[in-house]
Amino acid sequence: MNDLDTLVQAAEADFAAAGTPAQLEDAKARFLGKTGRVTELLKGMSALSPEEKKTRGAAINETKQRIEAALTARRQALADAEMQAQLKAESLDVSLPGRQRGGGGLHPVSRTMERIEQIFASMGFDVADGPEIETDWHSFTALNNPENHPARSMQDTFYVDMNDEAGRPLCLRPHTSPMQVRYSRQHAARHAGADPMPEIRVIAPGRTYRVDSDATHSPMFHQCEGLWIGENVSFKDLKSVFTDFFRTFFETDDLELRFRPSFFPFTEPSAEVDIAFSSGPLKGRWLEVAGSGQVHPNVVRNFGLDPERYIGFAFGMGPDRLTMLRYGVNDLRLFFEGDLRFLAQFQ
Ligand code: PHE
């Protein structure tokens, strides 16, 4: 074996001993680098005759190619080994079933809201939406509840440190009643020439806010406002609308309704509405479900209508309370804590 074969063998052994790509690069430098052994051989040729240079040069070149081939083979072997190790470490079982995406579903209060909307829509009520950041004027003043009047504390809310374009102070609406004013003013303007004006029949569900927090009160809660105004709308109509609504909502005719005298600045007379079931777990207990009353003449005037001619009723009910009754939940806060273990039970 000549010196060149020995060199190739030495290179192969050195490359085989390199366990990592970095070690292999070091080994490469020892043979093919600027001061490597192949380079040394080429330098050693300067003393040879032209004839000898030709044969010796060809032989060294061939040696260099064999070493380069050995290097490439070892590089590939190291890369393959690394890939195998990685595949083993990250072992991926493609036959496993994928992780299911949860089905998701409607929040129980959203279900109630949808039910309320459907039932009232079937009775010919429009469904309206309005701002949660509301003017103090729509929230109180227009509803016959003047500034500094003690009745404002019935709906104590959160004030926003800003005014609207007209300079009116803003607050988080403490009830959906401002929608009575917004909707009616639009309705009156839209039907300005009509005689008589088509009746107003609307509900306005949505979020409301009050400085209140315990098992049955949350600082954010829901209300659904209702308003029916025409030339001949009376408390009798309110009672029949409510009776139909609650019987449909709770899917039972075993349900009684009672009006209890109350006070709201925007209605006169005013009443709390209670219901009682004549069977089932809540049998015989009167449960407060809404505030209501005949819309006050001052409020009808703020609608842009003549209170001598147009009359009707308004009500505000609590979808959260209805959801608690329907599903037998006794702590309102559970609805708003976002705990999936609780919420998933309603799907
Ligand atoms: N807005 C009243 C409340 O939040 C409820 C109500 C609405 C009463 C409409 C009468 C008429 O308590």
Image: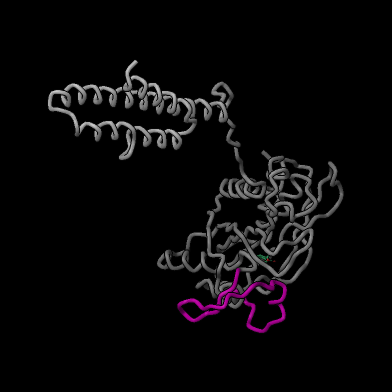
Residue 316 placement (x, y as % from top left): 66, 61
Nearer to the camera, 138 or 159: 159
- The image quarter containing residue 268 is bottom right
250 part of magenta stretch? no
Which region of the structure is painted magenta?
Answer: 143-172
Pick the front one: 116 or 96: 96
Question: Residue at (63%, 63%) from the top-left corner?
Answer: 208
| Image spot of residue 157 (x, y percent) | 66, 72
Furthest-left residue in view? 50
Residue found 41% across the figure and 33% down from its top: 27
Q: Is residue 231 left or right of residue 30?
A: right
Residue closest to the eye, 295 or 87: 87
Q: In the image, residue 176 lies at what x, y percent? A: 61, 64
Give the image quadrant in which the ligand numbered 1 is located.
bottom right
Percent coordinates x, y for residue 153 in the rendering: 71, 76
Vertical placement of residue 159 versus 43, above or below: below
Along the line of sight, which residue is nearer the eye, 247 or 2?
2
Tell me if I can see residue 52 in this picture.
yes
The residue lying furthest to the right in this view is 284
Q: Residue visible at 57% across and 58% down?
A: 204
Left or right: where does residue 174 sit relative to residue 6? Answer: right
